[in-house]
Amino acid sequence: MVDVEVIEEPAAAVAALDGIRAELLAELAEPASAATLAGRVGQSRQKVNYHLKILEANGLVRPASERRWGGLTERLLVATAASYAVSPGALGGAGSDPARSADRLSAGYLIALAGRMVREVGRLARHDGRVATLAIDTEIAFASPDRRAEFAAELTAAVTDLAARFHEPGADGARPHRLVVGAHPIPEEQT
């Protein structure tokens, strides 16, 4: 089971975003049968089985094992990932795209950049398996908008200097990487 699976197919996104199916995916971190899940989610076994077939058809759950109960065979299923993210690619031309945002200081532009990262890294992980990445995640409290602007100017200068020193597009085996740096206020309910 992978940590995070990026859903790229529209049908799989629709399947995963259904309320009952999303609940079933969360319950399937460990293998379980339709009967067991029915008790956990408060639905009939038949209804749960119907939703499990849709999840399985879209590659979001897979068979884990079978067990026999008298003359019956009970299938146990498990989620294909610990968690899921939906790629903007699942929305086709309506998906977020930073090229369509004129204001590079807007929330929409930052969301579009994040969406592009989900789409690109998800695609790489699906096709290449392990992907060499780098992530920096920290919190910083600015005393004022002026201090935030000072920080942004210094960070821009530092990143520009580092990029100039390490950017070697003509080197043998050079592979382009995308660097995205973003900052946003933390929602109040998370502080």
Image (cartoon, rainbow, N blue to C red):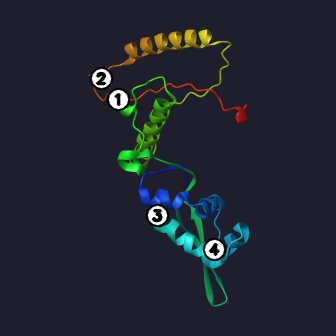
Q: CA distance from mark 4 to mark 1?
A: 46 Å
Of 112 and 157, which appears nearest the observer? Answer: 112
Q: CA distance from mark 2 to mark 4?
A: 53 Å
Which one is earlier in the sequence, the residue at label 2 or at label 3? 3
- Looking at the image, which residue is at 53% across and 58% down? 16
The amino acid type of the residue labelled 2 equals Pro
- Using a 10 Å C-alpha cutoff, classify the residue at mark 2 as few (fewer than 14 neighbours), some (14 to 19) or many (20 or more): few
Q: Secondary structure at mark 1?
A: loop
Q: Can you identify the residue that label 2 sits on? A: 169
The amino acid type of the residue labelled 3 equals Asn
Which one is earlier in the sequence, the residue at label 4 or at label 1? 4
Which one is earlier in the sequence, the residue at label 4 or at label 3? 4
Of 177 and 99, which appears nearest the observer? Answer: 99
The amino acid type of the residue labelled 1 equals Pro
- Looking at the image, which residue is at 61% across and 75% down? 47
Which one is earlier in the sequence, the residue at label 1 or at label 2? 2
Q: Which mark is residue 58?
A: 3
Closer mark to the observer between disc 2 and disc 3: 3
Tag 2 near tag 4, CB within 8 Å: no
Q: Can you identify the residue that label 4 sits on? A: 34
Q: CA distance from mark 4 to mark 3?
A: 17 Å
Image quarter hosting the N terminus = bottom right
Residue 171 is left or right of residue 44, and the answer is: left
Of 100 and 136, which appears nearest the observer? Answer: 100
- Using a 10 Å C-alpha cutoff, classify the residue at mark 3 as few (fewer than 14 neighbours), some (14 to 19) or many (20 or more): some
Which one is earlier in the sequence, the residue at label 3 or at label 1? 3
